[in-house]
């Protein structure tokens, strides 16, 4: 596992659990709004002090009984060839595992679910599920079928999950309404406000984006399509 960082405690990243977050290096998307720039931009990888997996495992051993869960995020964790082996080590220590993913590797997601080694999955839905809408946000040519497959696998998984959209410049009300048509009936859907901090493409801050108030309004309109839906 190529690990670029660890947050030793969080109360907000795994619902209702005390957790740590592990950040993997590398991503197959280039979302304009991405704030994990060093984990995504290869030219900045040399600035990252990667952490040896053994060191992480030793640290986690000291947290048994103190932490309840481990969140694996990125970058895009499903790009790591030894993700499954790493999760197995974490599960052996008794932690719950949450996986954050962009949904580009449905086979990896399916394998982890079949082996029952993840307890919660959060998938980003970057935009309406057409190639042109998606590409303009993620800046990569992608196979939309993989994204749709991941959505389907997760909705049928039986584990706890959430979908979420960062409503960045380029994502419109209309786009959100069309996302809703695709994931109607999902357990949870969150609209995340774009944060104009240090992002991958600082130019995107010159474009308009929907405000938190507008997202609250949209969440109210669409909430009946989901078990839970809110703007955050
Ligand atoms: S936001 Fe997530 S999927 Fe997009 S580039 Fe950043 S790490 Fe990758």
Image (cartoon, rainbow, N blue to C red):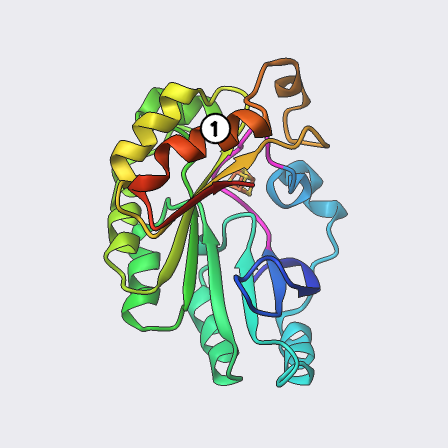
The residue lying toward the viewer, choosing from 86 and 62, is 62
What kind of secondary structure does the magenta stretch mostly adopt? loop
Which residue is rendered at x = 49% and y = 19% of the image?
170
**Residue under the image location 58 percent in, 24 percent down:** 211
Asked where in the image residue 78 lies, by quadrant, the reply is bottom left
Residue 82 seen in render: no
Residue 38 showing in the rendered view? yes
Vertical comparison of 171 with 99: above or below: above
Q: Which residue shows up at 68% across the image and 45% down it?
A: 45
Judge by depth and name the residue closer to the eye, 163 or 79: 163
Q: Nearer the viewer, residue 202 or 47?
A: 202
Q: Which residue is tagged 1? A: 217
Magenta segment: 24-34
The residue lying at 62 percent from left, 85 percent from top is 65
Position of residue 21 measured from the top left corner of the image (x, y, whole percent)? 62, 62
Image coordinates of residue 225 in percent, x first then y, are 29, 40
Secondary structure beneath disc 1? helix
* Circle 1 Cα neighbour tier, 10 Å, few/some/many (<14 / 14–19 / ≥20): few
Q: Position of residue 209 (x, y in %)?
A: 56, 20
């Amino acid at each position: 596992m190529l690990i670029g960082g660890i947050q030793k405690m969080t109360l907000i990243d795994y619902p209702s659990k005390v957790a740590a977050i592990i950040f993997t290096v590398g991503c197959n998307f280039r979302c304009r709004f991405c704030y994990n720039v060093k984990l995504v931009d290869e030219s900045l990888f040399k600035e990252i002090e990667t952490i040896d997996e053994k060191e992480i495992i030793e640290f986690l051993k000291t947290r048994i009984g103190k932490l309840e869960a481990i969140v694996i995020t990125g970058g895009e964790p499903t790009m790591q060839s030894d993700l499954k082996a790493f999760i197995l080590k974490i599960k052996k220590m008794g932690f719950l595992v949450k996986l954050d993913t962009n949904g580009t590797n449905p086979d990896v997601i399916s394998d982890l679910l079949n082996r029952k080694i993840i307890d919660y999955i959060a998938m980003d839905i970057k935009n309406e599920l057409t190639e042109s809408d998606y590409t303009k946000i993620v800046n990569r040519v992608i196979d939309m079928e993989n994204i749709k497959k991941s959505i389907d696998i997760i909705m049928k998984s039986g584990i706890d999950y959430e979908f979420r959209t960062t409503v960045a410049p380029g994502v419109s009300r209309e786009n959100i309404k069309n996302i809703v048509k695709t994931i109607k009936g999902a357990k949870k859907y969150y609209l995340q406000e774009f944060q104009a901090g240090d992002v991958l493409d600082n130019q995107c801050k010159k474009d308009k984006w929907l405000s938190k108030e507008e997202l609250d309004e949209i969440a109210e309109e669409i909430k009946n399509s989901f078990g839970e839906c809110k703007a955050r």
